[in-house]
Amino acid sequence: MKLNICIFYMLLVIAFANAQESIVISGHVLSHNKKEPIEGAEIQVGSTYAISNAYGKFSLEVLKSELKECLKVSLLGYKKYEKFLNLEEKHHFKIYLEEYRTQLDEVTIRGNKKKSFLKKLALSSVLISKVNLERKKETSLGKSLANIAGIGAITIGAGQSKPTIRGLGFNRLVVMQNGIKHEAQQWGTDHGLEIDQNAIEQVEIYKGPLSLLVGSDAIGGAIVIKETQVPEKNTLAGKISINGQTNNDLVGFSSFVKGRRNHWYFKNSITVKDYADYKVPTNKISYNGFVFHLKKHQLRNTAGGEYKVSGTIGYLKEGLSNRTIISNVYEKNGFFANAHGLEVRKSTINYDADNRDIDLPRHEVNHFKITNETTVAEETYSLKITTGYQNNIRKEFSEPSEHGYMPKPSANLERKFDKSTYSINGNMKLFSMENHHIKLGVNTEYQKNNIGGWGYIIPAYARFTIGAYAYDKYRISSNLYLHGGLRYDYGILKTKQYKDWFKSPIHKEGKIIEEFLIRSSAKKLEFKSISASLGTVFTKGNHTGKINVGKSFRIPLANELTSDGVNYHMYRYELGDTTLKAEEAYQLDLEYQYFVRKSSISVSPFINYFPNYIYLNPSFNYHEALQIYNYKQSKVFRAGGEITSTLAISNKMNLKIAGEYVYAEQLSGSKKGFTLPFSPPISVVFSTLYKLKDTRVFKNTALGMSWRITGRQTAIVPPENKTKGYTVGNLTIFTALYNKHKKWGDIYFKINNILNTQYFNHTSFYRLIEVPEPGRNFSLEIQIPF
């Protein structure tokens, strides 16, 4: 009897083992057009899942009970592949994925493409293709991105701006370009973003703390700019573009060329712009008791020019990818002649003689950048190393004049900043562990910033940072992913002593003597910080949900730590504090998205807490008749979010509503109860896009309109002014031109501020001196491919 029972159990075990027997399925995932390997594709058979490596290879162990299941392959940017295959006879496959060709809007990226991107991180994120960027292009990259809920722009006239995410900008937001941080003088209110938006191929925006992956400064989030396109083999193509605008009489030209011969490829882009003083919907500016009359509504001395060039040379073969990208951006533009910052200016220059003259005050900036990216891929891992060097030279010119004890300088160069940055970033992706997508990385950066000119605002300094992180995306199931990571950073900041170039009288031992005053002492400061992130992404059918908790940090700037001098343009004396700690932030992000056919809704709330936010606080003390502002730290609470809804009325028309709101309050310090500087007011954008019927000549034609309703902003921090709400409308038309089924051009036509509304943007650089936003503007761009 016992023998029979043993035999029975042995048969059960054998049957169970046979039932659970598995077969290894393997193959390659390739692009349909280029026949090149695709990394990161998700392959699924039943309950089994795998990710293709840099060779496009994959393998997964499939239970025999699931051999007749559907083979599914998906990846961001490609159409979903689904096919029932006879897995009992064939165990190796070549799978070709087709690329998506067009997109209607960045929030209507449907199906698998959107879901794949959403799984990338647990933060609220937006993907913008080159097509969308072309259709929404404004006068600067920051303004182009400001069409997205939660993204704003601090405008600096008509031609420049700097982006913000949920009200945070400057050094609380990181711009990554081709694998390295874009490092300029981003701390300055009147400093723009030195990047050619015509050369951009894809933008990823992450709302929320991203210090885990990129290091210091990404407290508010990150804007990641990528080169994603590789020319097809044995091809040569390109396009030229001409554009013009009426508000500032802009004339622009750009060209783009790309080609490839087997393993080698190249790209090149050139952009040239020249523009005159821009127009505002008023004939006078009233500020601080002064009235500045404007000729033909032109804001005098705001003309400028841009000259940008970039080139890429790359090598690509199985298992190895290398590319070098070189770019140079030169910009020159003037500032409003009658007032700069808070300073009212009087000059004998005839600014109205020519509206294209660039007189004083003005700035010139040249940003040179070279990066090299090498990727080595093996069966079980891929290794990417990115090195970069960039040099940012910024010169600010103004008419010399006496200030306090400072005599009249002999030159026009008020300030010069010469910043060189060396970067090395490395990361490794591991594919050997089932259901784990592990990423290990190291970031190092060395900066050296020299100064010049007769005006002082920040000291010369050198900064070194190094950080290491580990990040894991764990697949719990095909619908549920867990994201988590930990990072450690170390930084050193060395500032140089700065003395006035002129003598000032001081009291010393009962006597009045004259000395060269020390405005900044030589210091060596160290900073350490730990960043962490934990989140989850859930996708089920048309639903996607995200939860993320993160801690991020920012190393204080040199001026926040050691400044001790006059900011003449802002009429204040600024004092740094060497005891400031590294700024930290904790944030909870939630996101829910629902997609059905061509309609969608997205809700993205957040809660943010700073235990030691750094800000410039006005005091009751004065120095040489100027109010002293001290850099302090306080507790800050922020909350808000975005809601976006797109409704397809028909196959030709959709409606979209996008709203955003940010609440900020200081919880401690002398400004307890106040908000934060540059806090954006609540706003809602209503827009519609209507696709017209194709003809022989005009195809893919669409007409779009948008109305932005912005509430008033009464929560301010001095010297900010309360800002009234406003409503402003824009119109867009774009189409493709064909001749005998061959495309020969694209046309983009836009009207900004249709009703020529006079309104103030609370986050504009010129808001402080009561300058309204630009008036009505007609713009036309024609692109001709070849």
Image (cartoon, rainbow, N blue to C red):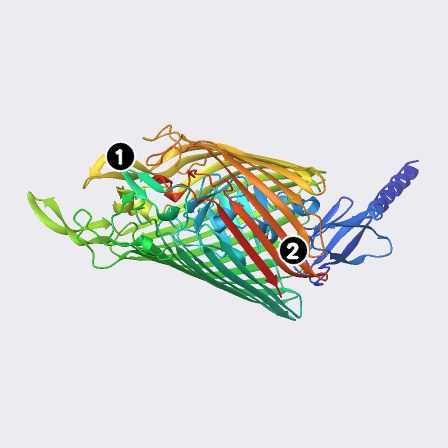
* Of residues 456 and 299, the one drawn nearer to the viewer in this rendering: 299
Q: Quadrant of the C terminus?
A: bottom right
Label located before the other in sequence (1 or 2): 1
* Number of the front mark, 1 or 2: 2
**Residue 87 spot, x, y in % from top left:** 84, 53
Q: Which residue does the numbered mark 1 point to in the structure image?
A: 619
* Of residues 752 and 191, the one drawn nearer to the viewer in this rendering: 752
- Farthest front residue? 296
In this rendering, is residue 156 above or below 643? below
Q: Which mark is residue 221?
A: none
* Of residues 716 and 519, the one drawn nearer to the viewer in this rendering: 716
Residue occupying image coordinates x 14% and y 51%: 515
Q: Which residue does the numbered mark 2 point to in the structure image?
A: 736
Q: Quadrant of the N terminus?
A: top right
**Residue 190 spot, x, y in % from top left:** 37, 48
Circle 2: element type: strand
**Residue 138 spot, x, y in % from top left:** 51, 49
Determine crowd level at label 2: few under 14, some 14-19, many 20+ residues with C-alpha closer than 10 A. many
